[in-house]
Amino acid sequence: MTAPRVAVVLGGGGAKAAAHLGAAVALADAGIVPTHWIGTSMGSVVAVAMAGGADPAALLAAFGKVRRHEVLRRIPFALLRGIWAPAIFREAAFRRTIERLVTPRRFADLRSACTITAVERDTGRVVAFGSNGEDAPVLDALMGSCALPPWFRPAMVNGRAFCDGGIRTPMPLDLAEHLPVDLVIAIDVGPGFDEIGTPVLRPPPLLAAADTAIGWLMAGTTALMREQWNLKRNLPALLWVRPVNDRGATFALDRIAEYGRAGERAMRTALQEL
């Protein structure tokens, strides 16, 4: 019996992207080797790492050792400058963390097909990098895919400025529509209308308002993309996995291990039901 061809789509979610790695552990245990990884925002970091042959359990352990002060270093007086601040956090510290976690430096070095997305700042256009997309240095493309405003400044990729891909495609399902696969597994850890309860972290009120508004827009886009997939004909089967729905957990790095376990549990349950 021929093994099914599987594409995995990973949405953004900051620290909650640890659930992607837990899900990857469950996939590996089930003997499922995806032929194509697709990701955006922090999902793009996991997608590139997995396509490069990383061990998901080892990467999850390394991710769990990252401390907030290592990756989230404020630009001096950013909060005092208010609306005149270029961003809240320095991108250099975040880039150094990604360099430690992700080994490949070229898309050509990946073992599996991989596509990630970012949004071109000056046009609002969604740009795909990697397989079936534009070539670029991997670290540059990842920085562009993760440059979520107002937390980080846009990142330069191939001479153009890019922002977080999750702003336009929080779940980039459209990149999987025409792939030669039998099953698409979408792992959703981003904003959703199912997020309830007290936020895990509370930023200053103005940032919280912006974060909430962006989150609602992203949640609506995710729901629309899923609905459109289900309405179209002749598409691969879609398995939707929603491991975590914490509010305000983008920078909850102390919950990495918890989110990893949630992703593994959710994927094992989904595969059993499948």
Image (cartoon, rainbow, N blue to C red):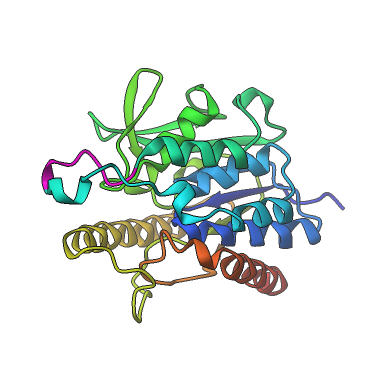
Residue 117 visible to the viewer? no
Residue located farthest toward the right when viewing the structure as drawn: 1
- Residue 172 within the magenta-colored segment of the rendering: no
Residue in the picture at 34% in, 74% down: 199
Q: Position of residue 179 (x, y in %)?
A: 59, 39
Is residue 148 placed above or below 139 in the rendered structure? below
Residue in the picture at 26% in, 59% down: 211
Q: Position of residue 13 (x, y in %)?
A: 44, 57
Magenta segment boundaries in residue numbering: 83-89
Residue 260 visible to the viewer? yes
Q: Is residue 32 left or right of residue 91?
A: right
Q: Position of residue 162 (x, y in %)?
A: 33, 32
Count of marks placed on residues: 0
Q: Quadrant of the C terminus?
A: bottom right
Residue located farthest toward the bottom when viewing the structure as drawn: 197
Q: Position of residue 82 (x, y in %)?
A: 13, 49
Quarter location, residue 91: top left
Residue located farthest toward the top when viewing the structure as drawn: 159
Residue in the picture at 46% in, 47% down: 71
Is residue 230 placed above or below 39 in the rendered structure? below
Is residue 148 placed above or below 20 in the rendered structure? above
- Residue 86 within the magenta-colored segment of the rendering: yes
Which secondary structure type mostly characterizes the magenta part of the structure?
loop
Q: Is residue 195 left or right of residue 122?
A: right
Q: Nearer the viewer, residue 113 or 94?
A: 94
Residue in the picture at 22% in, 58% down: 207
